[in-house]
Image: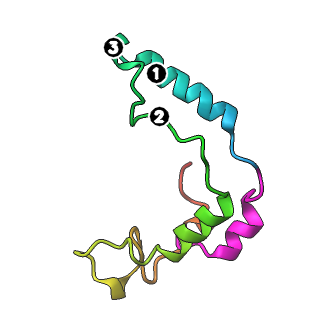
Amino acid sequence: MNLEEEWGETNLELDKPPPLEHIREKNDMIARSLPEDMRDVTPLALLSERTRPARDAWRRSVSTKHRRINDELPRHRYLTRFRKVGSKDPRENTDREV
């Protein structure tokens, strides 16, 4: 979408604490889905409860969007990995189905 850092400050809840209860519920579901003999081993599939501040994650995402353009795409023709230079902002396209 080629969003800027200021957009996140205005439209995202960057100071809101992470949903730890939701993370714990997901980890319980993941653990229950594992075979009995694997439940004692800490699986890599579990979500980390050591969360990063949302503001840091947002800034990192915005600042690295140009580096995430695939090598096969001409960087002078793409603003982001999925957005071409000169393309309309999808937020302004009111004709699309949601």
Q: Of marks 1 and 2, which one's residue comes earlier in the chain? A: 1
Left or right, 22 with respect to 86, comes to right
Image position, residue 24 (x, y; %): 61, 29
Task: Give the vertical position of 98 relative to 41 (above or below).
Answer: below
Left or right, 92 with respect to 72, comes to right
Q: Residue at x 22, y 75 (%)?
A: 72
Q: Of marks 2 and 3, which one's residue comes earlier in the chain? A: 3
Image position, residue 52 (x, y; %): 62, 55
Residue 89 appears in the rendering: no
Query: Residue reaching furthest top?
Result: 36
Name the residue type under label 3. Answer: Asp
Name the residue type under label 1. Answer: Ala
Residue for badge 3: 37
Numbered disc in front, either 2 or 3: 3
Residue for badge 1: 31
Label 1 crowd bin: few (<14), some (14–19), many (20+), radius 10 Å: some
Residue 43 appears in the rendering: yes
The answer to whether marks 2 and 3 mark residues whose Cβ atoms lie closer than 8 Å is no
Task: Give the vertical position of 91 relative to 66 (above or below).
Answer: above
Q: Residue at x 60, y 70 (%)?
A: 59
Image position, residue 98 (x, y; %): 56, 48
User: Quick one: SS at disc 3?
Assistant: helix
User: What is the distance, in whole Å, between disc 1 and disc 2 at their CAs?
Assistant: 8 Å
Q: Residue at x 54, y 22 (%)?
A: 28
Numbered disc in front, either 3 or 1: 3
In magenta, the rendered stretch is: 1-16
User: Quick one: SS at disc 2?
Assistant: loop
The disc label shown at residue 46, or none: 2
Asked whether residue 4 is drawn in magenta, I would say yes
Residue 62, picture quadrant:
bottom right
